[in-house]
Amino acid sequence: MDFFEASLARLHQLRFPSDLSFTRDGTAVVAAVRPAAHELRQSPQSRVWRFSLDGAEAVQLTNGPGGNGLPHLSPVDGTLAFVSDRALQGRMSLFLKDDHGERPVGELAGTIEDMRWAPDGGSLIVMAADRGLDGGATNGAQRLTRGEPEDPAVTSPANARRRLFRVRVDDGSTVEVGPSKFSVWEFELVGDDAALAVVSVDPSERGWYHAELTRIDLATGAATILHRARWQLLAPAADPSGKRIAFLDGWSSDRGLVASEISILDIATGKIITVAPSGMSSITSMKWRDDDSLWFTGWSRLGSVYGVTHLDGSVEWMTQEDAIIGTSSFSAGITTAPDSKGFAAVRESDGAPPEIVFTSGAKASAWSAVSNLNGDVARDFNAYPEVRAVAWKGADGVELEGLVLLPRDGAKGPRPTIVDIHGGPSWAVRHAYNPGDALPFATAGYAVFLPNYRGNVGWGKAFGMLNVGDPAGAEFQDILAGLDKCVTAGISDPDRLGITGASYGGYLTAWAVATTNRFKAAVMVSGFANQLSSHYSCKDFHAFINGGPLSEERYRRVAVDRSAITRLDRPTTPTLMMHGEGDRCTPLGQAQELYAALLERGVESELVVYPREGHGLRERDHQLEAWRRMIGWFDRYLGSPR
């Protein structure tokens, strides 16, 4: 087995913890643990585990069948609430586990996406999505179905919403407690009788981009609008006194990727102040510590930042690490202990796969390992590449950063190089175990350039909006300037360059195919090539990245001009397109359009469609097939480096 095949095998052994919560006494953490992929026609086989802080052996708490997740411990006893689709594949239902065993509780037609225990432990408030809605881009972006396929599949705002329910623990009685005219995207409880929620009238993914912050009376379902945002909202939380609300309000390309300064709303006056600790405006999560301070976590350049800030913006303490502190590269986060004197997190970095860690001090000077889920993978990954940070300037002097992966094979001189462009664009490549999901390229012998370009998060709110109104403009020049830096530094062979990317990275890959002949091969994954048709077949992202609503001609002209499909004058780059059949974020039609247009112009192209997949591939065999196909494509046109 060569290094490339060995790396695929190792990466499929990884396990990923998420949804951390402490036991009441603070001596252990429970978490959901999912595998790297799932088998044909299975749901992801995640399980709930208990990890002791004293180093005792971890205990698996749930055994399936189906997937288990969202573990939440009762605030009054040891009862564990979790969700599972063991009863009907694709529909996450509520289960309780205590000393007497496991039992289903509640009667819900929708699939549960989030939940909270009521303070008295007598009930849970759950958020459930009706059949026929879509998942977010960061979670596959597929139509939410369950059991037998829909026949017919009906989409209508009149019959599908994300709803709030109260489920009683003692008898399972279930009552809808959310507003009748809004769809709820996320919520946080305020005592036993109210919730803060991000809601929209439009229940589709388009509605999320225009959501509002509300307070919901759980007794009547009445919703009071507290804030109408210009951009996107995330993570509302009330202070201990219930007088102020912290939330995030900033431009985001996808649900779950908001990163901004912290907004504080005074409920009595309606006044909003912003808190940017030490100038940080890429915060992704926060939690009130007391009435005057908040824990916060966010992105800082190629790593993460976390600490405690006061409402005047002064920082009690703050730590920056070249690592991802959070359950994924989408959102940084920590979980505070019951006594607020320590916190747990999922941490990963170069060479160190995701593990649960804990620190007991106010300042995280040293992490202690809580889990050992991936130790064998890290120890045996002999082909793990060298990871280098690289800095350069864009055409107009904007300072930029990214990563380069270099195989450890002893080869000298410039290498065949793959430029791997991340999606979003409200995202970034960071120090992670598998940065940009690009390890297989490096183990196949390629140098990999992972550029961060203007519009990415981690360099401040203003930087994150530099590409609004200018998609594929200066941001694409940023990428080419970074590649020039790699060539000048002797890393990259200018005659053996390939390009790839997924989602928005797929869009920029298509743009490269349309506007330059610099690359010898391209692979577009889950991308889009026609902004106008993409806008009307998926979400409202295009109305923001192009500067305004596409119903207005001036913004529509930008969308048309910055679409690869309208710029295919003299393309020559052999292009492979790979797409999930059920992708609702960047619909399959986008790849079909580009494929037909390239064939019409005599460009060698190939379109590969993966059934049962959405935005990204999750079945094990599909992942393996896709990686082998991509490497084969680049080997054919760049010349195999092995």
Image (spheres, rainbow, N blue to C red):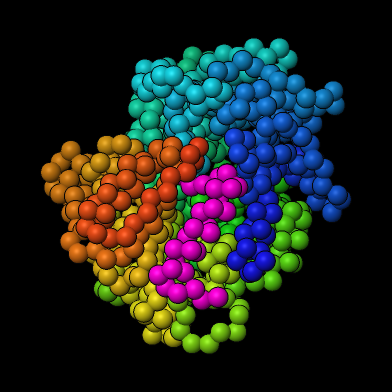
| Percent x, y of residue 87 | 66, 22
Residue at 75 percent across and 44 percent down: it is 29
As for residue 113 lying within the magenta part, the answer is no
> Which part of the image, by quadrant, shows the N terminus?
bottom right
Q: Is residue 434 left or right of residue 476?
A: right
| Percent x, y of residue 506 | 37, 55
In the picture, residue 633 is in which quadrant?
bottom left
Above or below 252: residue 404: below
Residue at 37 percent across and 54 percent down: it is 606
Q: Which stretch did the figure color magenta? A: 615-642
Given residues 565 and 281, the one toward you in this image is: 565
| Percent x, y of residue 153 | 41, 22
Q: What predominant SS class does the magenta segment belong to? A: helix
Residue at 34 percent across and 38 percent down: it is 538
> Which part of the image, by quadrant, shows the C terminus?
bottom right
Residue at 27 percent across and 74 percent down: it is 395
- On the question of residue 602 being in view, the answer is yes
Given residues 75 and 332, the one toward you in this image is: 332
Q: Is residue 368 left or right of residue 460?
A: right
As for residue 636 lying within the magenta part, the answer is yes
Q: How many marks?
A: 0
Given residues 378 and 274, the one toward you in this image is: 378
- On the question of residue 243 being in view, the answer is no
Given residues 65 and 485, the one toward you in this image is: 65
| Percent x, y of residue 563 | 23, 53
Q: Is residue 230 left or right of residue 254?
A: left
